[in-house]
Image (cartoon, grey):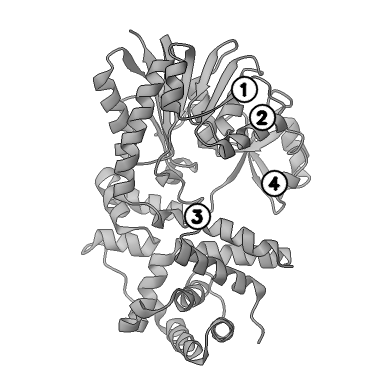
Amino acid sequence: MAVSQARKVALLALVEMEKKGAFINLSLRELMRGRRMKAVERAFATQLAMGVAKMRLYLDYLIERLCERRFHRLTPLVLNCLRMGAYELTVLSHPPYAVVSQYVELAKEYGHVGIASLVNAVLRRLSEEWQHIPLPRADEDPIGHIAVKTSHPHWLVEKWIKQFGFEETVALCAANNLPAPLCIRVNLRWTEVELVERMLELRCRKVERARYAPCGLRIDTTMEITKLPGYKEGLFSVQDEAAMLVTYVLEPKHGETIIDACAAPGGKTTHMAEMVNDAARIIAVDVHEGRMQLVREAAIRLKLRSIEFVVGDFIEVAKQHEGVADKCLLDVPCSGTGTLRRKPDARWKKSQQSIAELTALQLRLLEAAALTVKRGGVIVYSTCSLEREEDEDVVNAFLRAHDEFEIEDASAYLPTRIEGCRTEEGFVRLFPHKHDTDGVFVARLRKVG
């Protein structure tokens, strides 16, 4: 039986992720670039590789109970063969005979007879026994129960249980394993939401209005986004709805000078320009020239001319723009724990230590932003993190050192009322499981002194 091209590509991408720490989506794109594959094969390769990357802990838990001592000696090639087979059997419910046959052949092609024999034995047992393998009990080991069942790192589950409680953590982790909606932001400088909606209805399986952002649409399409009508003409951009709402909280106005401190890839920068009809001075800052090029390209495609591009470390750039800004958007580098459903392998690339390192940088960037705004000016601080250390704790540490700033109710600037998004302090926090958006934190601070 010939092994499907999709399974070969998925296996190679997963091994590359394991050995080199590569991002699974980039590995898939590179591997598929030089191969002739039908659309259905590309879709299956993506589903398989992304699914295995996401559910790795759960799959390993099952496999380890069948391999026992041998588990920790398995090579990345063998282990990912087993993970893929386990994913097809347990998550996709594919027929056991076909699954086992495919992975035995795959093991022969990339390994040897001994490896094929091991894969055959483990997957046969798994197909018969996996539903009877007990998971950690919620009443005895709540952290292990959620971590294994939803395939999230134990340390992160433990943090979330302390912060949100057991039931909320269960719901959040479950939501992280569901597909994220595909959202687009209509460029209201050049068109209207209804016109783009009607245009895309002809090419998409489903088009509907966004839940909260007036400029947003949710679409379901099998086409590549860049090939949809209106994309090249600059009529819309891809952006999660939560990210759109951050710009509404900033409330850019005509004639203002606005600094976007960490601008790349440019979604919020260009949204500002669209909201003011290209009639503000918008200074986009980013430390990486390559990433700044993405902002330039977005501005050109969207036909926006009000954006200035500054490449450099914002902490240094801020000293050159002291007191010039009416508003400063500070969308800081963060752990991204609010975006795990979009990045299936990201949950394994984070740690408590990396969060601690980020918070120090975030506070320095907020200090720099304070230099740039005029009296009466506004800073909007945002992350796509769900961690207090990066969110409330950073803002509160800043406020303790800067009594010239005060908190404004960020939820008051949202374009529509969103249930359960306002925190006690007046910040906005959105969740995948509550709002069906990326997890986002937003604080609005005004300089009053």
Q: Is residue 233 visible?
A: yes
Q: Which residue is mark 3?
A: 178
**Nearer the camera: disc 1 or disc 4:** 1
Asked if residue 211 is positioned above or below residue 3 in the image, the reply reads above
Seen as rendered, the residue at the extreme left is: 140
What number is the disc on residue 225? 4
In this picture, residue 80 sits left or right of residue 169: right
Q: Which residue is mark 2?
A: 299
Q: Earlier in the sequence, mark 2 or mark 4?
A: 4
**Cα distance in 3D space between marks 3 and 2:** 32 Å
Classed neighbour count for the residue bearing mark 2: other residues with Cα under 10 Å, few (<14), some (14–19), many (≥20):
many
Q: Residue at x 60, y 73 (%)?
A: 7
Q: Position of residue 221 (x, y in %)?
A: 69, 50
The amino acid type, in three-letter code, at marker 1 is Ile
Q: Position of residue 2 (x, y in %)?
A: 67, 84
Q: Earlier in the sequence, mark 1 or mark 4?
A: 4
Q: Which residue is mark 1?
A: 307
In this picture, residue 171 sits left or right of residue 295: left
**Nearer the camera: disc 3 or disc 1:** 1
Q: Residue at x 44, y 39 (%)?
A: 384
Classed neighbour count for the residue bearing mark 4: other residues with Cα under 10 Å, few (<14), some (14–19), many (≥20):
some
**Cα distance in 3D space between marks 1 and 2:** 8 Å
